[in-house]
Image (tube, helix red, strand yellow):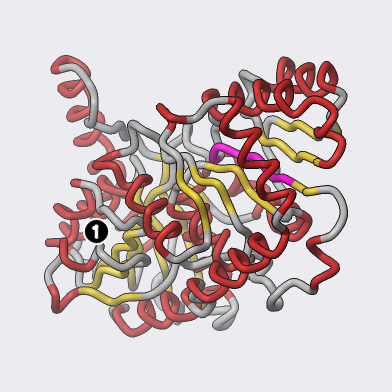
């Protein structure tokens, strides 16, 4: 995308992606930015292998791709290769920033974020960073030195950044990811409707535990209905597990209509990524959260503990998760619908539903005019 000089416009470059937790908050801000007027333009910078390459064309949002790779948990040789990719990604991003000429740059995290943010800093463009997690990663802590503002979404993250740069807000969410209010009593009646997902990539450990739980539930499984995002690898055998157990379950590799699934469900079984936490609170959906044990700096466990402390979720570490314990939890929730309704209320209380507008306003205020 080339900006033709002489045009009057406000241009937002959104850097990052890789996973839904990084991408979808950026999409929410992009939509809100576009609603400000026809002169408000947006461009995403990400990678070809990230979820952005699949999702943004469906959203009809422009994307330019660069080379990027993570450094965490890699061998020395892999880190050297990743460093070379980072340098090339910065060079590519310098060209993109020069062509698009953004008034403001929003870094949302993920592999594609760092090269574009560094390039924007070198080009002297104002930068806002979004930190979705309760425990920030090393990349955002370093990049925050280049940013004018850092928006933090969960309590506890602010202390890791310069106080004068921090703006506290919730996680920017798409318009459809907002509940109208508390669910009526009738919502909690009937079969317990369980939404299972492990993030945009699925989660093998959760899939295995659900399959084992179905066997433990036995005839009691008739009291449950499941919608299950499995990821590509586990789809077929999970479908077979539901069929073998005689349980009512819909399994898909990826769920594109998550807002409708959230509205349908009484309960979620999920990882504890930042986007998941933000959406669960906004939709008022109680959850059993199983933090990803290898998440950077333990941020998913910090997110899950925050939700549990709010009374909106239960947390179990992956090492403690078994099919039997999951079945027992599901049976407990099925017996005590009053508890589910209370957890839903606590989730809604923890939500900050104006975060998308707040982030859009922050970008406008920080933008170079």
The foreground one among 202 and 92 is 202
Q: Element at badge 1?
A: helix
- Residue 152 lies in the magenta-colored region: no
> Magenta residues?
194-199
Q: Residue at x 26, y 68 (%)?
A: 150
Give the percent coordinates (x, y) of residue 45.
41, 49
Of residue 249 and residue 125, the one placed in the foreground of this image is 249
* Residue 46 falls left or right of residue 227: left
Disc 1 crowd rating (10 Å Cα; few below 14, some 14-19, many 20+) is many
Q: Position of residue 229 (x, y in %)?
A: 67, 36
Q: Which residue is mark 1?
A: 120
Which quarter of the figure is the C terminus placed in?
A: bottom left
| Residue 168, placed above or below residue 336 | below
Q: Position of residue 124 (x, y in %)?
A: 18, 66
> Exactly how many numbered labels are in the figure?
1
Q: Is residue 297 left or right of residue 216?
A: left
Residue at the (34%, 73%) spot, across then down? 103
| Residue 18 drawn above or below residue 42 | above
* Residue at x 70% of width, y 41% of height: 331
Image location (x, y in percent) of residue 332: 66, 46
């Amino acid at each position: 995308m080339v900006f033709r000089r002489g045009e009057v416009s406000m241009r937002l470059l959104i850097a990052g992606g890789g996973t839904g937790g990084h991408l979808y908050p950026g999409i929410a801000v992009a939509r809100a930015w576009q609603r400000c007027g026809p002169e408000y333009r947006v461009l995403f910078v990400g990678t070809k292998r990230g979820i952005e390459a699949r999702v943004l064309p469906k959203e009809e949002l422009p994307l330019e791709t660069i080379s990027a790779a993570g450094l965490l948990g890699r061998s020395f040789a892999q880190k050297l290769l990743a460093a070379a990719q980072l340098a090339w990604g910065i060079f590519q991003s310098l060209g993109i920033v020069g062509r698009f000429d953004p008034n403001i740059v929003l870094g949302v995290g993920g592999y594609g974020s760092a090269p574009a943010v560094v390039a924007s800093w070198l080009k002297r463009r104002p930068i806002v960073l979004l930190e979705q997690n309760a425990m920030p990663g090393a990349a955002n802590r370093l990049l925050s030195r280049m940013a004018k503002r850092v928006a933090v979404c969960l309590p506890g993250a602010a202390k890791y950044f310069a106080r004068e740069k921090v703006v506290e807000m919730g996680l920017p969410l798409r318009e459809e990811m907002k509940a109208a209010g508390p669910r009526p009593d009738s919502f909690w009646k009937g079969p317990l409707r369980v939404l299972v997902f492990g993030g945009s990539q699925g989660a093998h450990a959760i899939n295995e535990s659900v399959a084992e739980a179905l066997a433990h539930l036995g005839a009691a499984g008739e009291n449950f209905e499941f919608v299950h995002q499995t990821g590509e690898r586990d789809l077929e055998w999970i479908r077979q597990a539901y069929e073998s157990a005689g349980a009512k379950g819909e399994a898909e590799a990826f769920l594109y209509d998550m807002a409708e699934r959230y509205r349908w469900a009484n309960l979620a079984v999920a990882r504890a990524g930042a986007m998941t936490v933000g959406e669960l609170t906004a939709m008022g959906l109680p959850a059993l959260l199983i933090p990803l044990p290898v998440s950077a700096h333990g941020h998913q466990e910090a997110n899950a503990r925050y939700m549990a402390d709010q009374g909106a979720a239960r947390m179990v570490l992956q090492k403690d998760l078994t099919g039997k314990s999951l079945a027992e939890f599901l049976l407990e929730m099925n017996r005590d619908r009053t508890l589910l309704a209370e957890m839903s209320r606590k989730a809604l209380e923890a939500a900050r539903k104006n975060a998308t507008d707040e982030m859009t306003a922050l970008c406008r205020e920080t933008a170079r005019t």
